[in-house]
Image: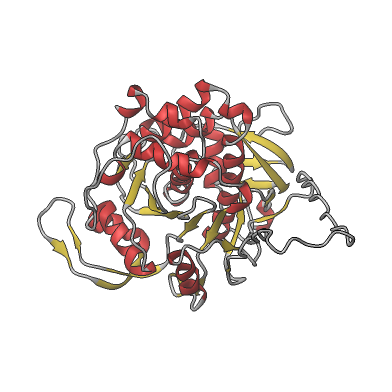
Amino acid sequence: MSDQLRPRSNGSKNLSTVARHGRQKRSSALKTVARFVAAGLAVVLVSSVSVAAIATFDVAKSVQPSVHLDNETKGPVPSIGAIDGGVNMLVVGSDSRKDQDAVFGPEDSTGDLNDVTMLLHISEDHTNASVISFPRDMYVPIPSCNKIDGSGSYNAMSRQKINTTLTYGGLACTVATVEKLTGLDIPFAAEVQFSGVMAMSTAVGGVPVCVAERIEDEYTGTFLDPGEHTLQGFEALQFLRTRHGLGDGSDLTRINNQQLFMSSLVRTIKSADTLSDPTKVYSLAKAVTGNMRLSDSLNNVSVLASIAVALKDIDLSKVVFAQVPTGNVTGGVAPSQPAFKNMFTAIAADESIQLSGKTGSGTVADPNAPVAAEPAPATTADPAVPADPAATPVPTEAPGAVLDKSVTGQTAADYTCTSGRLLKDQ
């Protein structure tokens, strides 16, 4: 590897040591970071105060030109208030380096693969939300898609990797592919860029992450000791790129690590320290809108704000991050049935989803996680007092759909630690 990345010491045992700009392996630099950038759009909308920031003129003017989706229809623009009904929004991260010199240096700007494909679903009653990750190497059928330059269309393909859809027909093609794959209607979409990684993590003052076993990754120059680290900027970017230094070194376990980061980011955004700081909220909104292309349906600050309002009061335990169940095939992975179909049947029925499996081999439970408060004991009725037959019974919450154990993930309320891997084990 030319220009080997070297760790940078900062003199603190509990702070990361990462490399600065330099030529890096494309397999690491381009296929991982977009997941974090994409996730940022989904989780930033949790902030209630961000509604005010997003509505400012300076944030609005930073939004990129929009993209028209095939099934998109114009409708009334919602007012500043919770959007009516549920939301399905696809968040796509491109591996293109165009105009990304500030992150990667003055290298070529080739590549336009959607190495991140994530679906944000908000329930109709706004009581739960889920962020579903589709592995970049998953083989799927791709429908006929119009070419980006308007010169015609591509024929439908029965089996291609999902991360090629952005190359074939842009954001609209990726949306059409996921709609065909899941059976869902997806009226909102966003394509995000690398440059938002550092800006978003810095805007909230850094994101705390827990490391269980030491991470050693020469490919990204990431070396982290066990303990808690607050990462922002380039350090956060490198942490999200890390693959060789955690779990089994696969891209699937890297998704586990990114879910850890996203969960912590949600908790950070919803914390009083972030929501009460107008500068942080404004910077976060600007970082998101300045680094994404939106579908026509989403390219309006009122729409963004209405989605934020719908998300702001959802309990952390009801925000689920899940990776679709897959099985290994030659050259990649494929959806694992019937668990895959059952997952999206539940989402289409607007059922809250619950995980029954583990977080995946990339992460482990945090032994120092805050202890949840014990629920108040149930009040025992006085047997001497007869029950009121006219009293309205207290409704009990529906359990929702319990996903197959093959579905890995965690909720935003779950505290997890990265399961690191040493160089000698790689």
Residue 418 is left or right of residue 238, and the answer is right
Taking depth in this image into account, of 141 and 421 the one nearest to the observer is: 141
Residue 368, given in percent of the width and then of the height, sits at 79, 45
Taking depth in this image into account, of 349 and 155 the one nearest to the observer is: 349
Residue 221 appears in the picture as rendered: no
Q: In which quadrant of the rendered view does residue 395 lie?
A: bottom right
Residue at figure coordinates x 62%, y 33% from the top left = 271
**Hey, which residue is sitting farthest bottom in the picture?**
338
Residue at figure coordinates x 57%, y 55% from the top left = 320
Number of residue marks: 0
Taking depth in this image into account, of 276 and 420 the one nearest to the observer is: 276
Residue 110, given in percent of the width and then of the height, sits at 29, 46
Residue at figure coordinates x 51%, y 34% from the top left = 48
Q: Which quarter of the rendered picture does the C terminus lie within? A: bottom right
Q: Which colour style is shown?
A: secondary structure
Residue 345 is left or right of residue 387, and the answer is left
Above or below, 358 against 295 in this view is below
Residue 294 appears in the picture as rendered: yes
Taking depth in this image into account, of 277 and 126 the one nearest to the observer is: 126
Residue 100, given in percent of the width and then of the height, sits at 36, 35
Residue 52 is left or right of residue 264, and the answer is left
Residue 13, given in percent of the width and then of the height, sits at 74, 32
Above or below, 190 against 352 in this view is above
